[in-house]
Amino acid sequence: MISTLLVANRGEIACRIFRTCEELGIRTVAVHSDADAGALHARVADTAVRLPGATPAETYLRGDLIVKAALAAGADAVHPGYGFLSENPAFARAVLDAGLVWIGPPPEAIEAMASKTRAKELMGVAPLGEVTEADLPVLVKAAAGGGGRGMRVVRRLEDLPDALEGARAEAASAFGDGEVFAEPYLERGRHVEVQILADTHGTVWTLGTRDCSLQRRHQKVIEEAPAPGLTAGLQEELHTLAVRAARAVSYVGAGTVEFLVADGRAHFLEMNTRLQVEHPVTEAVFGVDLVAEQIRVAEGHPLASEPPRARGHAVEVRLYAEDPAHDWAPQTGTLHRLAVPAGVRLDTGYTDGDTIGVHYDPMLAKVVAHAPTRAEAVRRLAGALERAALHGPVTNRDLLLNSLRHPEFTAGRMDTGFYDRHLAALTAPAPDPYAPLAAALADAHGRSRFGGWRNVSSQPQVKRYEMAGEEHEVHYRHTRQGLAADGVRVVHADARLVVLDVDGVQRRFEVARYGTDRVYVNSAALTVLPRFPDPAAQIAPGSLLAPMPGTVVRVADGLTEGATVRAGQPLIWLEAMKMQHQISAPVTGTLTALHATTGRQVEPGTLLAVVHELQEAP
C-alpha cells in the first residue's frame, strides 16, 4: 500500500492529485521551483521540497532532482501528472530503479508510444518523409510531449524551414527533446479521443469518448464527454483501435488514444501515456476518480471486469491568463480574485492574491459542468463563467463564454478550424456601457458632501476610464439627495455596490478596486485614466512593443538598423510560458531602431524595434 506520494508537477494537476490522496489517507509531497515557492500546490502538500532555479529545465524537467526529493521526503511513490516528465521513459525507469512505485505505465510502453513517430509506425501509420507541394498543408509536430507545443501549420513550402526551426526550439524547451516530424493537416476534422484504463491483470477499460476540437495553437481549450454526433459504428471503431493500441504495448494505468475524425473516418494521431488535462469530464460522466484508480492499479489491484456506465454529459473549459484578441499573448501579474458559483467543478492551482509568473503554462483553472444532457451542461457552464469573479490579468473568459453560446458549438458542429473562422467575432469587445459610470459612482461615494449652506446643484464631476481598449468619459453630480447622473436613476451607491435604474429596470454592479488605477465592475476590467492625458506618453508610429513578459530567443538573421523590411516579415521571437511568439513588421519600411538582442529579458510594453513606414511617391 502506498503511504506517501510525491507529485512531480505543479499547479492545478498537483493540487488535484493531492485532493485524491487526502481522501485516500495518503501523505503528499510537493516539489517546487524558486518561482513557485509560495504556490498553492507547495502550500497544500504535507511536505514540500525545493528544486533550485526557476525555469522548467532547471527544475521540473530535472528527473534526478525529483527522485532525490522523493527519497529525502520519505515518499514511496511518484505521480508525474501531465506535461514535463510524465511521458519520459528514462524518468519512469529512474523512479523504479530508486525502489519507488511509479504511478503510470511501464517505461517500455511509454517508450513505444511517447514518440509520435514510433507510435504511428506501431499503428501502421507512417509520417511524411520529404514534404512536397502536393503534401500541403502539413502540420509540423514535436515527436515528444503535447499541449500544442512544437506545432506549426505550414501552407507554403517556403515557410517549412522556419516552422521546423521554431518547432524544434519550442519542443526542446518544453520537453527536452527537439525531434519533430510532419503529417498531413486536415482542415475541418474533429479531435476525438478515447480514455483508457488498464490494470496488470489484463483488463482494459474504454471510458467513452471526448471531443477536444476547440483548440488554440493546437492546444485544447474546450472539451466534452461524450463526443457528440458520432455514429454507433464510429464509436465502436474508436474503442477497438484504443484497446488495440493499449494491448500492443502491454499498457498499464490511465492513458488516452487520440484521433482526428473526418468524413466519418478515424485517423490515429497519437497515444498519450499519462493522465490528460481534460480527464475531469470523463470522471463526471462515469462517476470515477481516475487518479484513485491509477493509484489502485499501481498497488496491483484489479479493475472490475466492466467499467461503470456513463450518465449525462460534461463540458470543461480551460481558463487561461491570456489575451485571445492579441495573438493569445500570455499575461502575468497578481490574481486578485478567482471565484466561480456553486454547482460546477473548479480545478485550480491558484488562490486570491497569487502571482502568475512568466515561466510556466498560463492556465489558471479548469471549470467543469455536468448535467443530464449536453444542452443543460453547456448552459450551466456558460452561466457559471458569466457570474465568475476574475480580477487580475486579462483572461480568455469572454472567449470561452462566447464559444459556448456560438451556434456551431451548441449544435455540436464544431471542428479544429473553429477559432480560425470565428476568432475575430468571438473576441469583439462588448463592454457594458454603464460599467464606467458605476465605477465612478462607487469611487465618489463618501468623497464629497454639501454643507447646509449650499443650496445649488454642484457642477458635474468627470472621470475617465479605459475599458476594452476604448476610453470612456463619465459625468455625475453630488446633489442634496445623493449622487445623480443623466439618463439613469441612482438607486444605491457605495464603494462596493451600485444599483442603477435604467428605463425602469434595476441593474446591480459589484465593484472592486485594487491599487489606485484598477477597477472591476462585475466582469469588466477598467483602468482609471488621468483627466488630462500626458502628451509624452504617446507611442511613436511603427513601434514594436513586447506584448508579454519573456525572453528574446531569436532576431531575424542579418537584421540591423537601416534595413528595409516588408509588412508581415518575422523580425523577433519571444519565448514566454514555454511558447514562442513571433513579432512581425507592422508595415513595409525602414528599421530605424532595434533594441532586441538574443537573451534579453523584457517586460510588457518594452520597446523592441521601430519600423518607419515607406511613403509611396506622389
Image (tube, rainbow, N blue to C red):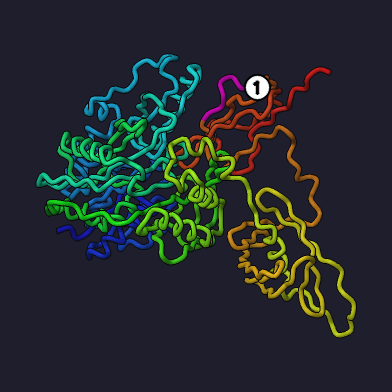
Instruction: Classify 411 as above or below 162.
Output: below
Q: Quadrant of the N terminus?
A: bottom left
Q: In this view, does 507 lie to the left or right of 215?
A: right
Label 1 amino acid? Arg
Q: Is residue 427 visible?
A: yes
Where residue 214 sits in the image (x, y, percent)?
A: 44, 42
Quarter of the image holding residue 375?
A: bottom left
Q: Is the magenta stretch mostly helix, strand or loop?
A: loop
Magenta-span inclusion, residue 543: no
Which residues, given as a range, are shown in magenta? 554-561
Where residue 451 sits in the image (x, y, percent)?
A: 84, 82
**Residue on which the image places disc 1:** 566
Instruction: Classify 488 as above or below 251.
Output: below
Q: Residues within 10 Å of mark 1 (few under 14, many from 20)?
A: some
Instruction: Classify 495 as above or below 579.
Output: below
Residue drawn at x 50%, y 40% as measured from the top left: 576
Residue at disc 1, secondary structure = loop
Residue drawn at x 50%, y 37% as measured from the top left: 575
Q: Which of 276 and 538 is in front in this view?
A: 276
Where residue 225 sits in the image (x, y, percent)?
A: 34, 49
Q: Quadrant of the C terminus?
A: top right
Residue drawn at x 63%, y 71% as measured from the top left: 496
Q: In this view, does 271 lie to the left or right of 199?
A: right
